[in-house]
Image (spheres, rainbow, N blue to C red):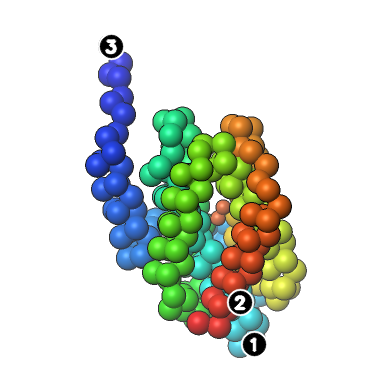
Amino acid sequence: MPRMQTPLRWSDRLIAALDDGLRVLGGASHAARPSPAEQVADAPELSTAERRTSAALLRVNHAGELAAQGLYSGQALLARASQTRAQLRAAAREESDHLAWCAARLDELGGRPSVLAPFWYAGSFCIGLLAASCGDKQSLGFVAETERQVEAHLDDHRRRLPAADRKSNAILTRMAADEAHHGTMASLAGGAELPSPVRRCMAIGGEMLRRIAALV
Ligand SMILES: [Fe+2]
Ligand SMILES: [Fe+2]
C-alpha cells in the first residue's frame, strides 16, 4: 500500500531553509541537468577581451541566481498551501541548475563570483518572506513578475555577449526558457497581477543587483 507523505512541520521547514542557504552560499549546488554549454560543439576560442566581457555578464547572472534561490526559499518557507510550496520548491530545483551552470561557466572564463553573494542571498530571502506573508496569490504573482523581468534581462545579456561565446549563450537561452516556464506556471496557479508601484520597486531592485554585481 502506498505510504502517505506526512506534511513537514514548521521546524523541519525552517531547518530545510537553513540547509538550503548553507548549501547555496557554500557553493555546493549541483546541477541535476547537464549544462547547455556542454552541448555546444566547436565553440571558437575567446580573446582576452571577450572572456572579460563574458565573465562580467556571467557574474551578474550568477548573483541573480543566488537571489533566485533566496527568493524561492523564503517564499516556500511561508507558503500557506502545500501545493504552492511544492511548486516553489520544484522551480527552485531548476534554478539550482542555473546557479551551478553559471558558476561553472564563470570559472571557465576565469571570472569570480560577486563578493556580495551572502547579501544577494540573504536580502532576497527576506524579500521572499515578505512576498509570501502577503498570501499565496500575491507570492505566485511575485514569481510571475520576477520571472518576466528576469527573462527581459536575459534577452539583454544575450545580445551583449560576444558572438563567439556560444557556450554562455546556450546557458542563458536555456535559463530564459525555464524562467518563462516558472512564470507561466505561477500565473496558472493563481498568481495575482501586482500593483504597478510594486512592479517598479522590483525593477529597481533588479537593476541595483545588475549594476552592483557587475562591479563587485
Ligand atoms: Fe534562474
Ligand atoms: Fe527564475
Q: Position of residue 81 (x, y in %)?
A: 44, 31
Out of 43 and 79, give the one closest to the viewer: 79
Q: Quadrant of ligand 1?
A: bottom right
> Could you tell me if residue 189 is visible in this image?
yes
Residue placed under numbered mark 3 in the picture: 1
Residue placed under numbered mark 2 in the picture: 211
State the SS at label 3. loop
Q: Position of residue 214 (x, y in %)?
A: 58, 78
Q: Disc 2 beta carbon < 8 A from ligand 1?
A: no
What kind of residue is marked 1? Ala
Which of the 4 quarters of the picture holds residue 50? Answer: bottom right
What kind of residue is marked 3? Met
Would you place residue 187 above or below residue 167 in this image? above
Real-space Cα separation, disc 3 to disc 1, in angstroms:
61 Å
Q: Position of residue 45 (x, y in %)?
A: 63, 79
Label 2 or label 1, whichever comes before in sequence order: 1
Residue placed under numbered mark 1 in the picture: 49
Real-space Cα separation, disc 2 to disc 1, in angstroms:
20 Å
Tell me if 166 is positioned left or right of 213 in this view.
right
Q: Which mark lies nearer to you, 3 or 1?
A: 3
Would you place residue 53 above or below residue 182 in this image? below
Tell me if 180 is positioned left or right of 118 in this view.
right
- The residue at 43%/78% (across/down) is 115
Label 3 or label 1, whichever comes before in sequence order: 3
Real-space Cα separation, disc 3 to disc 2, in angstroms:
55 Å
Out of 189 and 37, give the one closest to the viewer: 189
CB-based contact (under 8 Å), mark 3 and mark 1: no
What kind of residue is marked 2? Arg
> Could you tell me if residue 99 is visible in this image?
no
